[in-house]
Image (cartoon, rainbow, N blue to C red):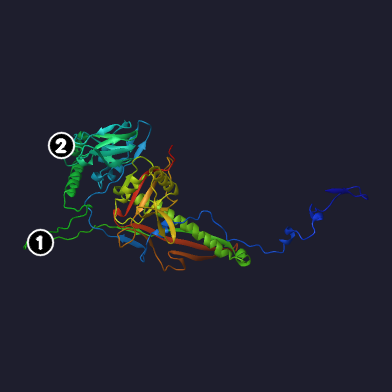
Amino acid sequence: MSTLDSATGSAVEEPARDPTAEQLTSLSTRAARQLATTTKSQPQMQAITSRWLLKALPWVDVKGGTYRVNRRLQLRTNRGRVHFEHNGSDDIRVIPQSLTELPVLRGYDDTDVLREIAGHFRPQEVRAGQVLFEAGQPVTEVYLVVHGRFTRYTCGKYGDEGIIGVVTDGDQLGDEAVGQSDPLWSASVRAETAGVVLAMPWASVEDLTERAPSLGAHLQSYVDRQHRPMNRKGEADVPVQAGHVGEPTLTGGFVDYELAPREYQLSLTQTVLRLHSRVADLYNDPMDQTEQQLRLTVEEIRERQEWELVNNREFGLLHNVDYGQRVSTFSGPPVPDDMDELLSMRRKTKVFLAHPKAIAAFFRQCNRRGLMPGTATIDGHEVPAWRGVPILPCGKIPIRDDQTTSIIALRTGEADQGVVGLYQTGIPEEHQPGLNVRFMGIDSAAIVSYLVTAYYSLAILVPDAAGILENVQVGRLPE
């Protein structure tokens, strides 16, 4: 507001006044706050999660920085999944190098033959409800599933249909025909959804085997390997006798080991924390600025550590669980039957890990059936459980664009041949177990730098220690 100066005739600005000052009869709170010390919280961070995976894993101290997982010799070749390239709706091809993920071609390295095999596959569209083949029919084609959900089923003892598995993207159908003169399908397969498969005539397989001696030798080696004595888990058998009487001669043997066991190198997450020396010197009351900066930096590193344990391609759970330990949901949403199927694939399952939306989707299915999941107590916290196994939320498990995710089941601990976390303690300038903070110096701009590093990894000791329920639909279905 301005007034007119009578002497000069120019406008003069008046000082601003509190519009309520004339009505006040005591000191205002606005003025009083200038003399008061505020009560402050520590700096808050919204991205901090419960990090249940880090809490659930038993951690093994890896003094040498490398952890070797020794196992018995495995004779049964594990399943893998092939990959495809899409150049249009009708131009779908299997990537030749990914064919070595099939059990019958594992370890085969003739790229020319692999390209020729890939060239024999032709795409076929499949409608929902279509039966690809029935049990007992001759094998005339082998299939690779590009996308879609297919059910393997057989006729039960009393004429009913028995579901024995679900086949999804990247799986194959037909390896049971290798080594048989007149191969027959052991189970029927029906498409539950519309999809696409790549098919190759079985006659082409036989022709390639005759024309490529290396392929024929490799397939024969695969057949011979499958006929060697093995236990139910595919490990080289140890001859034992039971129930005998008298003094028979006992068969001798030994436990054979893998000659090239897997080794896990400790991975790391690092960052450089920078803080101006003036801030560190002057602004430490009532909270130490360096301490608060370091606390939030460590929280961020631990969040990334858990993400890596789930998603890292070298050691993360989603990429390293054996494909034989993966099952797909039968109908999309996670129903109790799917959780039971996942639970039945291993002994002593300790925890389920699922995205919170997947847990909500499972609860919706329980509500539909009138079921009430139980609870379990972990570290004083009540968490939901299924069949007594805690279901722990883990937001690091991604939800894909098609609104599907995965649920992970773990058996943990070295004593149970489960899943273990790896770290090294006693490292220089250790701040927390497996995490250190090292002073890097002060530069010419008076910036103080600290190197913050966490060392970690994860090991699956035997294949059935971890399993995954895949294609879990988290979207809400219409009532």
**Rendered location of residue 170, percent (x, y):** 32, 41
Residue 179, numbered circle? none
The percent position of residue 338, horizontal first and vertical second, equals: 34, 45
Image point 19% across, 55% down: which residue?
236
Residue 443 is at least partly visible in this image: no
**Disc assigned to residue 182:** 2
- Which label is found at residue 250? 1
Task: Name the residue: 26% across, 49% down.
Answer: 78
* Vertical order, 363 against 206 (above or below): below
Q: Which quarter shows the C terminus?
A: top left
Q: Of 308 and 195, which appears nearest the observer?
A: 195
Distance from label 1 to label 2 (Cα)? 38 Å
Amino acid carrying mark 2 in the image: Asp
**Toward the viewer: 438 or 197?**
197
User: Label 1 crowding class (10 Å Cα cut-off): few <14, some 14-19, many 20+?
Assistant: few
> Please, is residue 281 above or below residue 374 in the view?
below
Q: Nearer the viewer, mark 1 or mark 2?
A: 1
The amino acid marked with disc number 1 is Leu
Q: Is residue 342 shown above or below 115?
A: below
Q: Secondary structure at mark 2?
A: loop
